[in-house]
Image: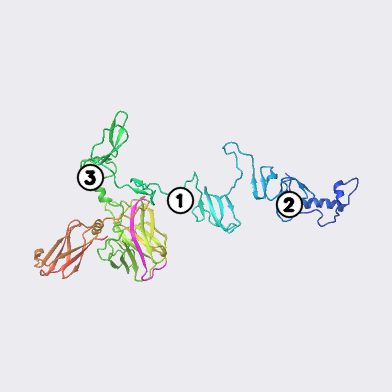
Amino acid sequence: MTDQINLGLVWASGGGFTPVGDAKYTGGWVAEIPTFQNFNYMVKGLDQNILHFAEENSFDWEDNIAYQPGARVKGSDGKIYICKVATTGDNPTAGTNYWVQSILIGSDDYANLQTSEGLKIAYDARVGNTWVGQDQTLLNSIPMTVFNTTSATNNWGLANVGGAMCAINLGQVTSPDGRNLSIGSSTTHKLFHEGNLPNVSNVTGAVEEAPNDGSLYARVGIDATSGNWVKVTSVDVGATPPAASIGAGAGWYNLEDGQFYLDINDGDSSQWVQANPPVVPDQAADRTSYDDTATGLGEDVQVAIDTLFGKIGRKNLLINGGFNIWQRGTLGVLPGRGQYVSADRWTSANWSGTELLRSNSTNYLHVNIERDAPRSSMYIAQAIELDEDSISPFLPGQTMTLSYEMNPDVDTKALFSVFAANDWFNTNDEVFAYNASQDVLASGGWQKVTHTFTIPSWTGAGKDRVIVEVGGRDGATFAVGQRNRVRNVQLEVGAQATAFEYRPIGEELELCKRYYSTLVVFDGSAAYNTPGSSGNWQLAQTVGHSMRAVPSVTVLGNGSGVWAVRGNAESFTAYQGTESSGSSSWRQLNLDAEL
């Protein structure tokens, strides 16, 4: 390989040189010694011509050169021309009989080359349908060809974007402007073809496939709604037994037993076979046993069902996550952490002077958290009771998901905290998980917050509850009167946040009453008063449900008197023993067995 040397220099450009005439060019040197000026001129001409080609990538047209088809020159107008017919002395700027502004690749058919063809690729035709090469290849992260117009209309590009052919609307922009070319941007559109068929949503006026919900559908007639799918709401059924089976695959719905049968030929004979046979024995669970090797639920199915129902219940481990139950009233100022004065089972997370207000908007309930002084964090908490013999489901390695919706008055960050505790001040408690990184904007309305975490190793020794905190913190300060709204709080086992569980209101109330309930009594009837051993009148009122523990009693209503509780959490009696006579008065007893 020859190395390039001094291409940018011209011999004798600063020295003496004397041109030679045309005759000397024709005859060349003879038996003579040329002058150094003539010799410099000849070498200078070679250098100068070569340097001109390097600078322009083409020679200028000259009228004394016999150009051949395919020759490339630069015209006096600065444009590049290709010779299509052999010529001498025909200026390329004068017409297109001999010169065109096009490029021909793969052929020598220059005589038929037209300026309007631009770049023309004319390789030999391929044989058959196999891929043995291509006329042009674009290699880039996003291979792209642009089609610009000369009028004020949209320019378009064709590109391979992430493996999909796309058309890109460039508007009237003619040069790259740094726009986003990815699929999904407003100006990038997939091209549909046999390998990339469109969905119904991609074609205006297209009729979707029949809904896939297990129901029967039919197309309507040929009127204005023709082509729409309509659900079939009635079918003909009868109690008449079907004809004898012939193994033809027919179906029969038996109204007598509510089962569906198929006409099956098993190779030996034809018979009606139940299409959906039961997967459990069709007998009472209390007469069914199974081999219990690992669950610890016993060997009786009914006992196992009762045990599972009592231990697991529904998926949401939180009670009153939808804020439906407010036995204490719909407005409460919290005196401090762990103090219950509003929505059942919920309290302020760590400060006093916080109001929890009940709000009903478009048929859903939520809680409004409001402070009596500016605060940078506003959140609430619930204590989940641990089984005295187990920490299930808060087992080491267990994946859990906490989800809720929040709508704050100021930009904040979503908080969740889950930790074991033996009191509300969680001294020396083991923290399971903590996260406050998800932004929740005041302008975003109701926003879903989801946190998935894994329970670390812990023993549960000395802990009687797991505390869950939700809300917002580490954001802009909430001023007085500004609120942080929370609704649909759910804690569940697993790595996904499922739809919020709406329990029946009666079931939710019964769950709440394990921790707090009210009891209204009338102590003015002699039928309910008996003399006490001290001579005072006594009133006994048995509570009809069990609670977490023996509750404390506070009294709302007329009259005086002190009430107390005897018994245990499952069976106890609230009684009064200080009335000196049977004066009439209504009393509301508030029974509190909160964690």
Tell me which numbered mark, 3 or 1, is placed earlier along the sequence.
Answer: 1
Q: Which residue is mark 1?
A: 203
Quadrant of the rendering where the N terminus is positioned: top right
Q: Which residue is mark 3?
A: 302
Q: Is residue 543 left or right of residue 180?
A: left
Q: Is residue 258 left or right of residue 157?
A: left
CA gap, disc 3 to disc 1? Answer: 55 Å
Colour pattern of the rendering: rainbow
Amino acid marked by disc 1 = Val
Would you identify the image quadrant in which residue 251 lies? top left
Q: Is residue 155 left or right of residue 406?
A: right
Would you identify the image quadrant in which residue 529 lies? bottom left
Dot 1 surroundings within 10 Å: few (below 14), some, or many (20 or more)? few
In this view of the protein, which residue sits in the foreground, 379 or 30?
30
Dot 2 surroundings within 10 Å: few (below 14), some, or many (20 or more)? many
Q: How many marks?
A: 3
Q: Which residue is mark 2?
A: 92
Residue 393 position within the rendered picture, expressed as x and y whole percent measured from the top left: 31, 51
Disc 2 on helix, strand or loop?
Answer: helix
Q: Which residues are magenta?
A: 476-494
Q: Is the residue 216 above or below the residue 538 in the image? A: above
CA gap, disc 3 to disc 2? Answer: 101 Å
Dot 3 surroundings within 10 Å: few (below 14), some, or many (20 or more)? some
Is residue 552 inside the magenta stretch? no
Disc 1 on helix, strand or loop?
Answer: loop
Amino acid marked by disc 2 = Pro
Point out which mark residue 125 bears.
none
Disc 3 on helix, strand or loop?
Answer: helix
Tell me which numbered mark, 3 or 2, is placed earlier along the sequence.
Answer: 2
Mark 2–mark 1 CB contact (< 8 Å):
no
